Image: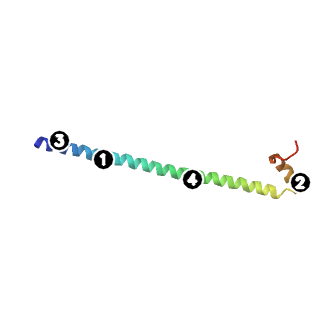
Amino acid sequence: MTLLLGLWLKFKGYLAMAGVALAVIAGAFLYGRSDGKADAEAEQARNNAKAIKKARGVEDAVQGMDGSSIDSSLAKWLRDRKR
């Protein structure tokens, strides 16, 4: 009986160490994941800012054109243009 109790206490100690190791690994994983999420959100914000800037440039260019130059520049995107 004493032998079983000794084995149980030893096993319990190993089990506690394994639990601590798993907690450390899970913490590191979750920290890295949240850090990666923040980096991805920052990258997306930079890409959105670039797209907005490009769209404003296009809008400004179109505002400076007259009707015929707008028609000629958009003709390449239309399907019903003459071939």
At mark 4, the secondary structure is helix
Crowding around mark 4 (Cα neighbors within 10 Å: few <14, some 14 to 19, many 20+) is: few
Image quadrant for the N terminus? top left
Quote the CA–CA distance across marks 1 and 2: 73 Å
Q: Where is residue 26 in the image (x, y as percent from the top left)?
A: 38, 48
Residue that badge 2 annotates: 68
Q: Quadrant of residue 65?
A: bottom right
At mark 3, the secondary structure is helix
Q: Is tag 3's residue or tag 4's residue first in the polypeptide sequence?
A: 3
At mark 1, the secondary structure is helix
4 or 1: mark nearer the eye: 1
Residue that badge 1 annotates: 19
Q: Which residue occupies 36% across, 47% down?
A: 24
Quote the CA–CA distance across marks 3 and 4: 53 Å
- Per the rendering, the mark at residue 7 is 3
Quote the CA–CA distance across marks 4 and 1: 35 Å
Q: Which residue occupies 76% across, 54% down?
A: 58
Q: Which residue type does callout 4 highlight? A: Ala
Residue that badge 4 annotates: 42
Q: Which residue occupies 44% across, 50% down?
A: 31
Q: Which residue type does callout 2 highlight? A: Ser
Quote the CA–CA distance across marks 2 and 3: 91 Å
- Per the rendering, the mark at residue 32 is none
